[in-house]
Structures are given as C-alpha cells and as structure tokens.
C-alpha cells in the first residue's frame, strides 16, 4: 500500500488523433520495422496499390559474406501511406508495426533506452512535469502507457533476440548491405543457416 502512495495518481495516455505521429520529415523519426513486419506492410501496400520504401538499419554479416537484416527503417516522406487524413485514423490499425503501436514511446534498440516523444500532442499537453516524473520514476511508464509499453517490450525482446543470435553465431554488425554476397531478412537467414 505504501508503494502506491509514493507513486500516486498518474494520467493514462489517450491518443488525441492529432496526426503528428503519422507525419515524417526527419529519417530519425521514421518507424523501424522488423523483417516480418516489413513483409506484412508490403502485402498490405500491394493490396492497396501503395508503394513503400525500406532501408536496412541493423545489418549483420557472417564469415561467408552473407548479410542478415534484423531491422529496417521504413522511409516515409510526409504522411504515412496508410493514414487516412479524412478520418485521422490508421487504415491498418490492427496490423501496425510495433514502432507505431508503442508510440509515443521510442525505443533505442542498441541500448534498450526507452524515451517519450515530445512530438506527441498528448505528451505536450501533459507538460514537462510528466516527463520529469517519468524520468524520476520510470516504473510509472507502464501505468501511463500500458499498451504502448507492451509493444515497446515486444520490440526490445525481438531486437535483443537478434543481437544475442548474432553474437552467439559470430555475425558482425556492419553499416550497410554493400559488399554482401547475399542479403536475407534476419528470420529467413536463421531458418536457412541455423
């Protein structure tokens, strides 16, 4: 009971449908997606006649020169092609990648650091006090952002699994797929080469 008193009441995140999370200018803001999410997005895009662009972001190379892409940057310039500006809703809401589901939480994959986006209108309305409180009491993050935290945890575990596999199997991290003899999605690489 005493722990609850220390934590006190906290607001619970509620999307304001402001559309800011679905509009991109800076590549750093653009969502990152895992290979299976990329393939699903490509299927959904094909059904809708939409073209998508992805760039390898987290790449590993084995001793044979084969590369495995564990994470892609989904390159979006302007509004997401799945965002309906009329309704201000995502047209693939049930199939959104983890990066979209965790927003306004942002995960730094390499470090596991979890941040809150200042771009989010709800976060801005809550003000600096909320961010300061979350920094001081990170255990509040799952209470303020329950569904988003679950998505962030799933993304962290997926990334950690890839990093662990790469280390265990001697794959080296590289900056790009240039010079790779073959390029695979990470899950496909694991299936093919164990």
Image: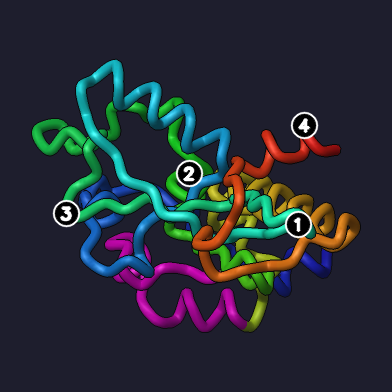
Observer-side mark, 1 or 2, equals 1
Quadrant the C terminus occupies: top right
Question: Which numbered disc flags the more N-terminal residue, 3 or 4?
Answer: 3
Is residue 192 shown in magenta?
Answer: no
Q: Nearer the viewer, mark 4 or mark 1?
A: 1
Q: Residue at x 58, y 74 (%)?
A: 134
* Pointer 1 residue: 62
**What number is the disc on residue 101?**
2
Labels 4 and 2: the sequence-earlier one: 2
Q: CA distance from mark 3 to mark 4?
A: 36 Å
State the separation of the CA atoms marked 1 and 3: 36 Å
Q: Identify the residue at image location x=53%, y=58%.
A: 177
Residue 133: % across, % down: 56, 79
Q: Chief secondary structure of the magenta span?
A: helix
Q: Which mark is residue 29?
A: none
Residue designated by label 3: 78
Give the foreground label among 3 and 2.
3
Q: Which mark is residue 191?
A: 4
Does 92 sit left or right of 68 as displayed? Answer: left
């Amino acid at each position: 009971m005493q722990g609850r008193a220390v934590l006190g009441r906290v607001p619970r995140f509620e999307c304001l449908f402001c559309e800011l999370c679905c509009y991109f200018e800076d590549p750093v803001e653009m969502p990152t997606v895992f290979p299976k999410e990329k393939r699903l997005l490509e299927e959904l895009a094909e059904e809708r006649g939409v073209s998508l662009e992805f760039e390898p972001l987290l790449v590993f190379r084995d001793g044979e020169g084969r590369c495995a892409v564990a994470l892609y940057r989904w390159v979006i310039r302007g509004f997401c092609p799945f965002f309906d500006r009329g309704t201000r809703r995502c047209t693939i809401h049930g199939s959104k990648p983890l990066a979209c589901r965790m927003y306004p939480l942002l995960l730094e994959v390499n470090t596991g650091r979890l941040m809150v986006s200042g771009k989010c209108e709800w976060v801005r309305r809550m003000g600096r006090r909320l961010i300061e409180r979350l920094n001081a009491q990170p255990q509040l993050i799952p209470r303020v952002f329950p569904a988003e935290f679950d998505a962030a945890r799933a993304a962290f575990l997926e990334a950690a699994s890839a990093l662990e596999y790469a280390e265990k199997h001697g794959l080296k991290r590289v900056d790009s797929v240039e010079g790779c003899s073959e390029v695979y999605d990470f899950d496909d690489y694991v299936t093919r080469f164990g």
